Image (cartoon, grey):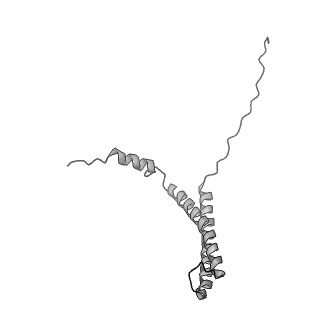
Amino acid sequence: LKKVRLKPRLFQLRRSLGFGTRAMGAGKDGCALFCMIMSAVAVPMLAFLGYLCSQESPMIELPNSQKADAAKGCYGSAVLYVATFIFAMIYRCKGQPTTQGRAVVMQEMQQVAGSHN
């Protein structure tokens, strides 16, 4: 039987992307960061769309009879994104280890007895 060897470039690519080199669960922190960024973008956008719908703006191409329900849906989705942001932020804060500073040892220099020139 012939052994099949993968090209070294493939291993270099995998290593540079971080596959197989991280501890298990290290990607969850990145996922939480992604959720925080998406939520931070979605909340103002949905709030603005909800505002436009509640004012029956002509920029929203819906019949005026449906705009009130659309506004409620936008506001409700914005609230859920706020909850997602808070959950992801709490997850990231709990996942980061708290490091304490090392104790600083202070020593005084003693003068050496002798002649000074």
Q: Residue at (28%, 47%) from the top-left corner? A: 5
| Residue 79 visible somewhere in the drawing | no
Residue 19 appears left or right of 95: left
Q: Is residue 63 above or below residue 29?
A: below
Q: Residue furthest left?
A: 1
Q: How many numbered marks, from 0 up? A: 0
Q: Is residue 84 above or below residue 29?
A: below
Looking at the picture, how far across and down is residue 90, in whole percent? 63, 62
Q: Which residues are magenta?
A: 99-105
Is residue 105 in view from this perspective? yes
Foreground pick, 44 / 99:
44
Name the outermost residue toward the bottom: 65
Compare residues 58 and 95 and report the one nearer the observer: 58
Closer to the camera, 64 or 84? 64
- Determine the residue positioned at 77% across, 28% down: 108
x and y percentages locating residue 14 in the rendered image: 41, 50
Q: Quadrant of the C terminus?
A: top right
Name the foreground residue: 94 vs 37. 37
Residue 106 appears at what percent x and percent y? 74, 33
Tell me the quarter of the picture where residue 55 sits. bottom right
Was residue 12 drawn as part of the magenta stretch in this picture? no
Question: Of helix, strand and loop, which mostly describes the magenta segment?
Answer: loop
Task: Specify the quadrant of the image occupied by residue 84.
Answer: bottom right
Residue at image x 67%, y 46%? 100
Residue 80 lies, with reference to residue 7, above or below; the image says below
Q: Residue furthest front?
A: 58
> To which quarter of the image does residue 60 belong?
bottom right
